[in-house]
Amino acid sequence: MKKALFPIILILLSSMAPPAFASEITVRLSGGLEKIESFKVNEVTYCSLSELVELLGERISWDVVGFSAEFESEGHRILFFINSPYINIDDTVKNLTYPVKFRDGALFLPAVTFIPMFDLTRPEQISWDEDGKTVRINSEWYNITDMSLLAKANGLLIEIFVTQPKDYEIYVTEGNWLNITIPGGIIDARRIQSRRNSKYLRDMNAYQFEASAQVSLRLRQPIETYTHRFQPNPGRIQVSLRDTSAAPIAQNGIDKVGPDDRIDKIIIDAGHGGNDYGAVGLKKTQEKKIVLDIAKRLAKLIRKEKIFQAVMTRDKDKYVSLEERAKIANSNNGDIYVSIHANASLKRAARGFQVFFLAPARNDAARAAAQLENAPFLSEMGSFSSGEGDDLSLILSDMIQTEFQEESAELASMVDKEFRKKLSKNPRARGIDQAGFIVLNEVYMPSILVEAAFLTNKNDEGLLRSKKYRQKVADAIYAGLKRFKAKYERK
């Protein structure tokens, strides 16, 4: 009952706010400029924390019972209460002077008082420019900025990029972990983690300590001998693994994966097909037909404007195996992979669109979506018939490739923003999320999975049956792809 009342109460709370002027403010961060929603209340500028943390690759979680929201990252925990000026940072009460606001499904904070507090909890330098109405996220503050893994004829070259010469210590620990500790290091952990590559690594971690930073890599092959040195221009710590067994595992003969200098080839994957109906709605609407129509509409948009090339994994009602989908994507040297689906839930009230990227699921809803979409592939792999593999973590724990995880997360964010613009809040936005989708794990390029709406919800099914809505879904995906190209394509 409390869950059912929660959205209604939040709407009532937000409606009690004084008149506000809606606009946007700028977020300046490495890679360019972004816009996030804002409004003014009595000359105080409120910014969307929901959108700001998305740009940082983070999420806000909601407490249904307490009408509060929580943000937890970098070892810090911030608790917000709707319509209260008091927040809790690491169990210490802080006064924002101006109350926290909830509006259109997002959390808004007074920029002038919150941003300085937020800066103290982040490894980046974050500041608020009142005159320019700009949030600045200065990633140049990091002195450990990036990492690369490169196969060589006699082994594997690992490079840790630093902004200035740094002392460092390297040692191997049990479990085949190679550890690089850098005294005085300030690490861009999100960037480093995005370089995770399952061809070479079983696991990796990036740690920020009070007086040092550490990169820990668990290699797939035994570490036998290695050499290391510091190289200037650009500054980097090089670790060369001399054991040739540390070279990458072959990937089905594919020697060129992911985007090149141009982002011009889009792989459009219509989920399910043939004897795999996917989700089935209350009016017997079949997911396989709905998503194929959206995929065709997206391909038509692409082919009409000719900014991209469109390659479809299926253009008719037929079953396409996991292996075939991956082969189509990788052999065509795709630059972006978009898998289109419609969601389902045992809860008939569940509704809305959502965009996912590949990473371990963070919550039960994301895990359920992955289980639903993975089911035919797991059956194809024989995991159901053997009685094994019902737990996705067992199947994906050693498989998830994260070479393009940062780019995929940003692509998901861009497509989500276009959905919010074009679908007029009907159905509601469920935000971007991450989960272990097998189909995304098999392709080597930035990739997302779109859930257009819930077939198991009466209102959502009605929308999905509408040609107008399906066209809007295609329009939103296409607009997101163009935004991604504009930011990432090398000129």
Image: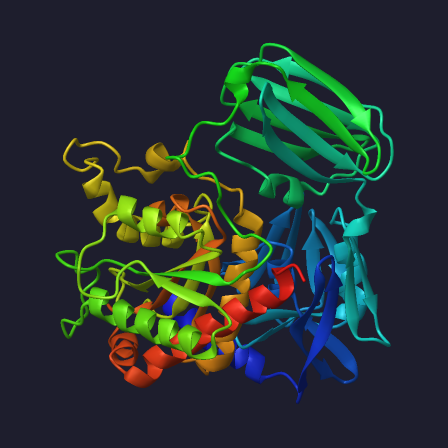
Viewer-side residue, 449 vs 36: 449
Say which residue appears at 15% left-offset and 75% top-offset.
283
The spot of residue 296 in percent (x, y) is 31, 72
Is residue 85 shown left or right of residue 474? right
Is residue 362 shown left or right of residue 153? left
Viewer-side residue, 322 vs 2: 322
Report if residue 466 is visible in the image.
yes
Say which residue appears at 86% left-offset and 77% top-offset.
131
The spot of residue 465 in percent (x, y) is 24, 79
Vertical comparison of 224 with 165: above or below: above
Coloration mode: rainbow
Report if residue 60 is visible in the image.
no
Say which residue appears at 83% left-offset and 40% top-offset.
163
Vertical comparison of 463 with 181: above or below: below
Query: Which corner quadrant of the image does residue 278 belong to?
Result: bottom left
Viewer-side residue, 331 vs 238: 331
Say which residue appears at 23% left-offset and 48% top-offset.
321
Vertical comparison of 34 with 243: above or below: below
